[in-house]
Image (tube, rainbow, N blue to C red):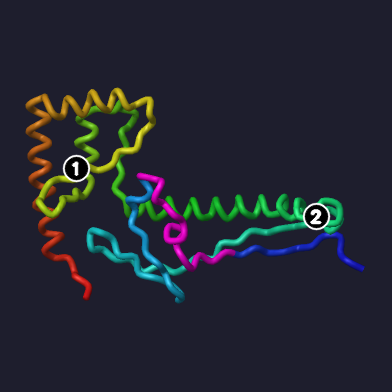
């Protein structure tokens, strides 16, 4: 006699980055994120653009699935899909938490404390970031992600950055400092054969 419930445990071990297997060519922001193939092993070394390294182990992510066998008889694959939904949500939540743990530990952040978007706030944010420059030494402005409602305000504040003498001076000093930092990073970067 079959049991009334079929108990399964769904386990997902991320052995290859989603970024590698997913085509991001139609997603302008995501396509800028570097991706690397991770091969077999117990862990990996994360090499950051700033030259820092972090050794990480793969994490086991799992979720429980309970399927009533009577539902499978009555609903077929639909019963399995319904049973997978909570496990999928559980795994997605674990992945989200892992991502934000890493981001909180590695990515500079700025708490605006409720202040509205302003040129000063943009400069404060840029002070906490590493800048990138092209082969000719030209600054590559970072991508800013914000609510479309903020677009007119952003445009106004970027105009202030280009027209107000105090802001221009602040930005030029910041750019000079960031270019020096970038030159130092590039001079110390390890080149791979």
Camera-nearest residue between 139 and 177: 139
What span is in magenta? 12-28
**Residue name at image x 82 percent, y 60 percent:** 5
Q: Can you name the residue that lies furthest to the front here?
A: 26
150 falls in the magenta region: no
User: Residue 19: x and y, percent?
Assistant: 43, 57
User: Residue tagged by mark 1?
Assistant: 127
From the image, tell me which residue sits under label 2.
Answer: 76
SS at circle 2 = loop
The residue depicted at 34 percent of the width and 28 percent of the height is 114
Residue 15 picture location, percent across and down: 49, 68
The C terminus is located in which quarter? bottom left
**Left or right, residue 128 beside residue 57:** left
Query: Which residue is pictured at 10% across the width and 51% down the height?
Result: 136
Q: Quadrant of residue 109?
A: top left
Q: Position of residue 29 (x, y in %)?
A: 36, 45
CB-based contact (under 8 Å), mark 2 and mark 1: no
Q: Main secondary structure of the magenta part?
A: loop
Vertical side of 173 occupied by 163: above or below: above
Q: CA distance from mark 2 to mark 1?
A: 57 Å
Q: Earlier in the sequence, mark 2 or mark 1?
A: 2
State the SS at label 1. helix
Quadrant where the N terminus sits is: bottom right
């Amino acid at each position: 006699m079959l049991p009334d419930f079929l108990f399964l445990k769904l386990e997902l071990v991320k052995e290859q980055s989603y970024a590698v297997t997913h085509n991001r060519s139609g997603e302008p922001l995501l396509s800028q994120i570097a991706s690397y193939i991770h091969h077999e092993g117990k862990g990996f070394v994360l090499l950051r653009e700033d030259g820092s390294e972090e050794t990480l182990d793969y994490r086991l992510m799992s979720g429980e699935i309970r399927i009533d066998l009577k539902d499978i008889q009555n609903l077929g694959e639909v019963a399995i899909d319904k049973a997978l939904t909570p496990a999928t949500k559980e795994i997605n939540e674990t992945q989200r938490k892992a991502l934000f743990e890493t981001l909180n530990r590695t990515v500079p952040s700025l708490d605006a404390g409720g202040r509205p978007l302003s040129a000063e706030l943009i400069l404060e944010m840029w002070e906490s970031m590493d800048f990138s420059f092209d082969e000719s030494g030209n600054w590559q402005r970072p991508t800013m992600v914000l609510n479309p409602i903020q677009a007119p305000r952003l445009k106004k504040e970027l105009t202030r950055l280009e027209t107000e003498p105090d802001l221009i001076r602040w930005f030029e000093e910041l750019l000079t400092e960031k270019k020096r930092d970038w030159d130092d990073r590039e001079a110390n970067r390890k080149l791979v054969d």
